[in-house]
Image (cartoon, grey):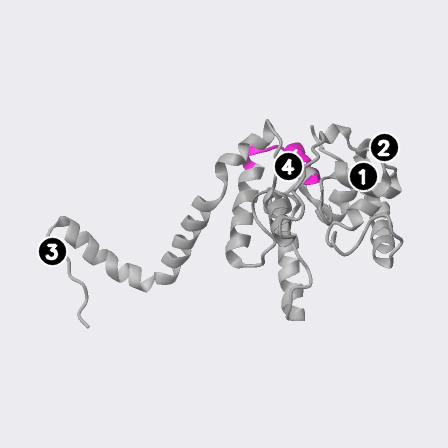
């Protein structure tokens, strides 16, 4: 097969020189192309508005509604972070992302640990999603596991960290996170499980709510299952190590 030859002019000479480079580096160009596609598909314009307004329906809410064949309509119960017991915020940070106030969206240290552990086990047994990455997924993406979704999640998380304060990100998180079947946000969760406002939760209830975040459809915070008891005990032992919004 003969190689493509462009006309003998200035543009043709440039293209003739570029073609061999593209062929030699096709993997790099493929990665760059994929990055561009992912970048322009993220909801960039929506991120800054999280500072000024709250969301009504998240992508995760829509996903759950479709899974239930629209039997229930997604419902959002928004609450300001200042109206939430600070122990709940500490509990979430201690268990989900203990370096939340230091990293810029991705915890590279935890990511490396997860990669090594998963390689040893031959399967995914340890995640490395930060609170920012989880917020990005809950707000704009789905729970599907694939490379494209993870790529979008990382890019959105980086943008969120660049444009939003840690307080805004954590506030979005506690209002978007799933706490059970059809239960989204801490206001709804506190009411359903403990009959309280988020500000009235005691320290044990805060620990229990944070304990079930990884598996909210399997475990309930108001039960005495071994899972809830074990994880809430770990959280209670870590609370004093968490300093909320240091330097603010």
Q: Main secondary structure of the magenta part?
A: helix
Residue on which disc 1 sits = 190
Residue on which disc 4 sits = 169
- Evaluate if marks 4 and 1 touch, with contact meaning CB atoms under 8 Å apart: no
Residue name at image x 49 percent, y 35 percent: 45
Expressed as whole percent of the image width and height from the top left, the position of residue 204 reads: 88, 43
Query: In 3D space, how far apart are the residues under numbered discs 2 and 1 (Cα atoms)?
Result: 9 Å
Q: Is residue 70 above or below residue 171?
A: below
Q: Secondary structure at mark 2?
A: helix
Quarter of the picture holding the C terminus: top right
Q: Is residue 135 left or right of residue 203?
A: left
- Mark 3 vs mark 2: in front: 2
Quarter of the picture holding the N terminus: bottom left
Q: Is residue 38 left or right of residue 205?
A: left
- Residue 163 included in the magenta stretch of the image: yes
Between disc 3 and disc 1, whose residue precedes? 3
- Mark 2 vs mark 1: in front: 1
Residue on which disc 3 sits = 7
Query: In 3D space, how far apart are the residues under numbered discs 3 and 4 (Cα atoms)?
Result: 54 Å
**Quick one: label 1, few (<14), some, or many (20+) residues within 10 Å?**
many
Residue name at image x 84 percent, y 53 percent: 228
Q: Secondary structure at mark 4?
A: helix
- In the displayed orientation, state which residue is furthest to the bottom: 1
Residue 46: mark: none
Between disc 3 and disc 4, whose residue precedes? 3
- Mark 3 vs mark 4: in front: 4
Between disc 3 and disc 2, whose residue precedes? 3
């Amino acid at each position: 097969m003969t190689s493509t030859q462009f006309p003998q002019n200035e543009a043709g000479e440039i293209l003739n020189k570029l073609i061999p480079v593209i062929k030699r580096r096709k993997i790099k160009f493929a990665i760059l192309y994929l990055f561009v596609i992912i970048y322009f598909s993220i909801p960039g314009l929506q991120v800054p508005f999280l500072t000024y307004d709250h969301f009504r329906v998240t992508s995760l809410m829509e996903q759950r509604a479709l899974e239930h064949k629209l039997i229930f309509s997604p419902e959002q119960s928004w609450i300001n972070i200042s109206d939430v017991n600070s122990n709940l915020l500490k509990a979430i940070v201690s268990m989900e992302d203990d370096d939340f106030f230091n990293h810029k969206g991705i915890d590279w240290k935890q990511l490396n640990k997860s990669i090594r552990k998963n390689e040893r086990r031959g399967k995914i047994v340890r995640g490395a999603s930060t609170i920012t990455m989880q917020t990005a997924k809950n707000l704009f993406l789905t729970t599907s596991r694939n490379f494209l979704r993870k790529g979008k999640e990382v890019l959105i998380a980086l943008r969120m960290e660049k444009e939003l304060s840690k307080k805004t990100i954590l506030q979005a998180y506690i209002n978007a996170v799933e706490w059970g079947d059809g239960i989204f946000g801490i206001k709804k969760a506190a009411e359903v499980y403990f009959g309280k406002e988020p500000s009235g939760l005691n320290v044990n209830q805060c620990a229990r709510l944070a304990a079930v975040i990884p598996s909210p459809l399997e475990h309930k915070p108001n039960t005495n299952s071994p899972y809830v008891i074990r994880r809430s005990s770990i959280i209670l032992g870590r609370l004093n190590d968490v300093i909320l919004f240091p330097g603010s």
